[in-house]
């Protein structure tokens, strides 16, 4: 796949922003899907062994971290939480713990966005842009999962 980076190409940033926080044609983005979710609702599982909203949010934060690291050409460092990919949540069922993990997601998104800006300016590792598109698609996919979990939990259509 060719490297699609150009110095003024806004497509990567637009896609990343729409998938996470900006209004988009496809419906709720990841941030909107998480808005108003309580710790109790975030911890709810549709069945034993299935992921909950909380785990999905932290999983999304991890992959933003992972792609940012790749864009910068960095070796594997340490994520804010011990482990990788999926993190058992909640460790403690509290609004404070839930909010802390939402802050982690927001921080990882901001860092990734800054890395994409540097990437577009040609200041970082020349990795193909598909990694960034992948994070956007990942956000949208999980936004849909979260919306479904919220509906399953409440029974509302």
Image (cartoon, rainbow, N blue to C red):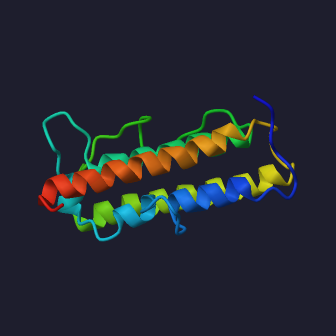
Which of the 4 image quarters holds residue 147?
bottom left
Residue at the spot 53% in from the left edge and 56% down from the top edge: 19
Residue at the spot 65% in from the left edge and 39% down from the top edge: 131
Residue farthest along the top direction in this orientation: 1
Whole-percent x, y for residue 70 in the image: 68, 37
Whole-percent x, y for residue 59 in the image: 41, 44
Q: Which of 138 and 62 is in front in this view?
A: 138
Residue at the spot 85% in from the left edge and 59% down from the top edge: 8
Q: In the image, 155: left or right of 83?
A: left
Where's the N terminus, which quadrant? top right
- The image shows residue 111, relative to residue 129, as above or below, that is below
Q: Can residue 11 be seen in this view?
A: yes
Q: In the image, 91: left or right of 56?
A: left
Whole-percent x, y for residue 80 in the image: 48, 48
Which of the 4 image quarters holds residue 121?
bottom right
Q: Is residue 93 visible?
A: no
Which of the 4 image quarters holds residue 4?
top right
- The image shows residue 18, relative to residue 59, as above or below, that is below
Whole-percent x, y for residue 136 in the image: 56, 49
């Amino acid at each position: 796949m060719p490297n699609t980076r150009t110095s003024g190409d806004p497509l990567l940033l637009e896609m990343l922003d729409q998938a996470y926080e900006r209004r988009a044609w496809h419906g709720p983005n990841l941030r909107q899907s998480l808005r108003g979710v309580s710790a109790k609702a975030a911890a709810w599982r549709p069945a034993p062994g299935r992921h909950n909203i909380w785990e999905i949010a932290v999983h999304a934060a991890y992959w933003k971290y992972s792609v940012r690291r790749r864009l910068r050409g960095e070796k594997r460092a340490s994520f804010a939480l011990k482990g990788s990919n999926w993190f058992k949540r909640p460790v403690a069922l509290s609004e404070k713990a839930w909010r802390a993990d939402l802050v982690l997601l927001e921080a990882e998104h901001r860092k990734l966005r800054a890395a994409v800006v540097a990437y577009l300016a040609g200041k970082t590792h020349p990795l193909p842009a598909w990694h960034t598109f992948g994070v956007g698609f990942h956000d949208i996919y999980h936004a849909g999962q979260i919306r479904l979990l919220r509906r399953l939990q409440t029974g509302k259509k």
